[in-house]
Image: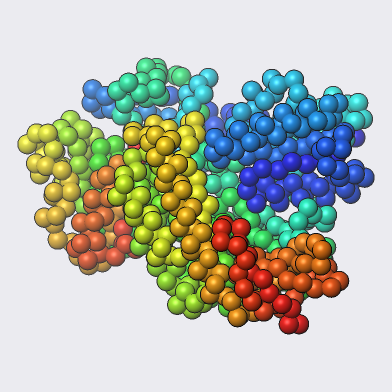
Amino acid sequence: MMTLMRHDQQMDESFYKILEIRHLTGNAFSIKLPKARFAFKAGQHISLGIVGGNQSREYSIYSGENEENLEVLIKEVQNGYFTPQLRRLKIGRMLEIHGPFGKFGMEREKAEKGKFVFIASGTGIAPFRSIIRTYPNIDYTLIHGVKTLEEAYDSHEYEKGRYVLCTSREKTGDYHGRLTGYLKTCTFAPDTQFDLCGNSEMIFDALEILKGKGFSRDQIHCEVYF
Amino acid sequence: MAFKTLGCRLNQYETDALVTDFSQAGYELVDYNESPDVVIVNTCTVTNQSDHKSRSVISQAARKAKNAVVVVTGCMANNFKEKLESQENITFVVENSRKSSILTLVDAHFSGEIAHPDQLPQDVFRYEPVRKSLHTRSAVKIQDGCDNFCTFCIIPMVRGNAVSRPVADVLESIRKTVDNGFKEIVITGVNIGRYSDGDTRFEDLLAQILEVPGDFRVRISSLEPDGFGPDFVKLFAHPKLMPHLHLCLQSGSDKTLLRMRRMYDVEQFRKTVTQFRAVYTDFNFTTDIIVGFPGETEEEFGQTLEAIKEFNFSHIHTFKYSVRKGTRAERLENHLPEKVKTERSLQIRDLSVENKIDYFNSFIGKTQDVLVEKVAHGVASGYGEHYIPVRFKLTGAQKNAIHKVRLLERKGDDENCYLLGEVIL
């Protein structure tokens, strides 16, 4: 005799209503959702899909661990399939979220005792904002590589002197050029931990520079973004 | 009833466990050419070729067993659920998470109940220890799913998030499998290096498995080259743990590895291999390589060839990159022509054979404990500790027996080569 079980309906656990959309630039925006119904570690990512759609994408969490809202940072891909749909969404629409995933980030004890250099290109800044908002006393320098000043997403939030903006297409940042160019000029303490998030080319170049400066691969942690 | 299995060792294990279930329930196992009443096809979807093979086996099964109940399960059932459900030659499509309850579904069908696969419970570890296997060695599943999201891989979408089986369940399953007479156990899962149950990590679990009493040996199925610590190397000093790892490199180029979103670089891989070979000089490493990944340059491919030579893999599973819908690699630029992928694949295969021959030759004159898997015309064949295929003559040889064999010569010059030996004990 077969036991007929109720179909496992846990879908409501994954559905989140959009509460707020913050337009940060002409093509970058953040989506605020209700507080996460799962425990996540700052630095982790989630999978995000539009209810009724058939695709999903992974995004690093942009908000801190204990915040009232779960937030993600998104850049619209020109002629892309998914992000233009996301951009057209209105407040109140439902998103399907799965996760959290990933090992990027650090334990609290390490965050409170270590010295960190965060290296991000573009929206790769997202996990670092989550980490910094989760551990407000963390000792960090955030090096952010973008094309133009407007892509310095929420840069006013970071403590003065800890955020270094590298702009490659205009002289509006702290450094004019790619972040890897800036990295070459830097000196870091030997016990520094490096966390990199961005496209694979940036990460490859930054890794080579850091290894060239004598840092062990074990001190460098990477999250590739696409 | 009949089974057809495609793909990885995990799928094979799950089929073996289902065979146990159905056998205990009184079903007779037959070949699917012998008009079975039920055919279960356990599919794979990891590459385009896997999809093609899975589709072909489903059609064949439905054609040969015309009035049979055809159950399609496995990763393709997750990836193409709706499409498969619309096919008239398939009775049931069962997702991976409900696969362990297929017996309930089939029983219900024959009892005249209206049953739907979506009503089956979801439990990826519900499988009974294997009793009646299609193979000599039995796998034990310790983990399922993966959260790595490598850009080429569809597995997180079809196997779900990483989940680990509780330690006590794993140890109980090992004990029962040993009691069922298996002499070799393969620890399996989707990403077993990421095993985590409370404070117990993969190497902690492995240490406990090795302490389970009984006359058996342990192998590890494929492993990602990250997620384990230095104690892992030490564990291989244990006589039960076999000196072979299938450590998935995928590419010898750091740039390609980053595009693949792999969690390690070549230097870290090198460190692992060096650590092992410093202690166990003849340790056997085999690997997976993907050729023709989007954007792979000649230089990057050359780095892969160099890595294969350096790490001396005795066998390489070579995969020509194929697009999996919904993965990030689908959206990467610079997809390579099939011709380039084929040429590169052939180069890897040639190198793999060279490595294999060199590695096998290095064992001539040595001895191996060979677990007999097959006996035909007085010749026993099986694998030694290092996972080298060995054949030897022995009157009255029995499957599932272990013999000490001196290795005398290599037979064959291709990827199917093996070592010929003589029993010394």
Quadrant that contains the N terminus of chain B: top right
Q: Which residue lies furthest to the front in this view?
A: B412
Rendering coords of residue A191 (x, y %):
26, 66
Q: In which quarter of the image is residue A177?
A: top left
Q: Which of A93 and A214 is in front in this view?
A: A214
Q: Nearer the viewer, residue A161 or B326?
A: B326
On the picture, is A86 further left or further right than B169? left
Rendering coords of residue A92 (x, y %):
45, 19
Rendering coords of residue A210 (x, y %):
22, 58
For the point 34% across and 53% down, which residue is it?
B302
Q: Which of A146 and B266 is in front in this view?
A: B266
Residue B13 visible at all:
yes
For the point 23% across and 50% down, which residue is it?
A205
Quadrant that contains the C terminus of chain B: bottom right
On the picture, is B224 further left or further right than B86? left
Q: Which residue lies furthest to the left in this view?
A: A171
